[in-house]
């Protein structure tokens, strides 16, 4: 699947907590990313956080 132009940049910022869920939704409204891409980004963050939680234990 080909992603939107800004997908990688927005994803990186979200993973660093520089972008909130509300801002992600706004990017969808502005058509910078699709709703499906927003879901992918949020799932990637969940996976990242699960991995970090496992390392801490």
Image (cartoon, rainbow, N blue to C red):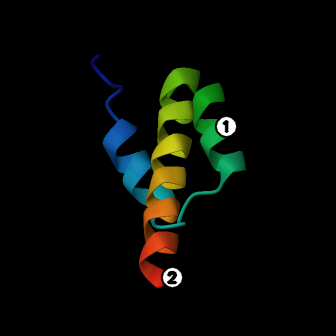
Q: Earlier in the sequence, mark 1 or mark 2?
A: 1
Residue highlighted by disc 2: 57
- Picture quarter containing residue 19? bottom right
Most extreme residue toward the left is 2
Q: Secondary structure at mark 1?
A: helix
Compared to residue 32, the image places residue 50 above or below, namely: below
Compared to residue 57, the image places residue 5 above or below, namely: above
User: Rounded to the nearest whole Å, what is the CA distance between mark 1 and mark 2?
Assistant: 33 Å
Quadrant location, the N terminus: top left
Q: Residues within 10 Å of mark 1 (few under 14, many from 20)?
A: some
**What is the x, y in percent for residue 25?**
67, 37
Most extreme residue toward the top is 1
Along the line of sight, the residue nearer the viewer: 24 or 55 = 55
Total numbered labels placed on residues in the image: 2
Compared to residue 49, the image places residue 41 above or below, namely: above
Residue displayed at 47% across by 71% down: 54
- Picture quarter containing residue 31? top right
Dot in front, 1 or 2: 2
Most extreme residue toward the right is 22
Residue 34 visible to the viewer: no
Q: Is residue 50 left or right of residue 6?
A: right
Residue displayed at 37% across by 37% down: 6
Residue displayed at 58% across by 23% down: 35
Most extreme residue toward the bottom is 56
**What is the x, y in percent for residue 14?**
50, 56
Along the line of sight, the residue nearer the viewer: 9 or 52 = 52
Along the line of sight, the residue nearer the viewer: 19 or 42 = 42
Q: Is residue 23 left or right of residue 51?
A: right
Residue 25's disc number: 1
């Amino acid at each position: 699947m080909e992603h939107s132009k800004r997908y990688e940049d927005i994803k990186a910022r979200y993973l660093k907590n520089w972008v909130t869920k509300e801002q992600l939704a706004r990017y969808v409204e502005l058509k910078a990313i699709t709703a499906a891409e927003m879901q992918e980004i949020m799932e990637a963050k969940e996976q990242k956080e699960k991995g970090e939680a496992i390392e801490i234990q």
